[in-house]
Image: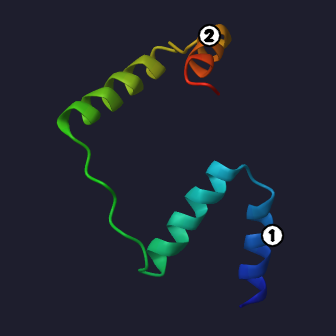
Amino acid sequence: MTKLLEQALEAARALPPDMQDDIARVVLQLAHDVEPPVALSAAERAAVERSKAAAARDEFATDDQVRNLWTMHGL
């Protein structure tokens, strides 16, 4: 392993898990060792578009709404 790759991995270790996974996916894609992304259904694509539109309008769940949702799912 090169020194630069070791430095990059060390920097990645300090990041939150979701960011580490993003980096891992990119590295695996560059190494040609990753499965293709899962295709979304039309309903899933529509849900993503609705979410993006709401975010563009700065419409986000409140902390209480998020807590309530987590509680509903035992988190």
Image height of 71 relative to 23, above or below: above
Q: Secondary structure at mark 1?
A: helix
Q: Secondary structure at mark 2?
A: loop
In which image quadrant can residue 48 be found? top left
Tell me residue 26's x, y (percent).
51, 66
Disc nearer the start of the sequence (1/2)? 1
**Type of amino acid under label 2:** Thr
Tell me residue 45's x, y (percent).
26, 35
Residue at the far front in the pictured view = 74
Q: Which quadrant, please, contains the C terminus? A: top right
Q: Nearer the viewer, residue 34 or 50?
A: 34
Disc 1 packing (10 Å; few <14; some 14–19; many ≥20): few
Image height of 14 relative to 31, above or below: above
Disc 2 packing (10 Å; few <14; some 14–19; many ≥20): few
Q: Which quadrant, please, contains the N terminus? A: bottom right
Tell me residue 13's x, y (percent).
78, 62
In which image quadrant can residue 34 be found? bottom left
- Residue at image point 38% right, 21% down: 53
- Residue at image point 36% right, 69% down: 35
Q: Nearer the observer, disc 1 or disc 2?
A: 2
Q: State left or right for residue 66 relative to residue 5.
A: left
* Residue located beneath label 1 in the image: 10
Which circle marks residue 61 in the picture?
none
**Type of amino acid under label 1:** Glu
Tell me residue 6's x, y (percent).
77, 80
Q: State left or right for residue 46 relative to residue 26.
A: left
Q: Nearer the viewer, residue 10 or 38?
A: 38
Disc 1/disc 2 C-alpha distance (Å)? 35 Å
Q: State left or right for residue 73 relative to residue 29.
A: right
Image height of 29 relative to 12, above or below: below
* Residue located beneath label 2 in the image: 62
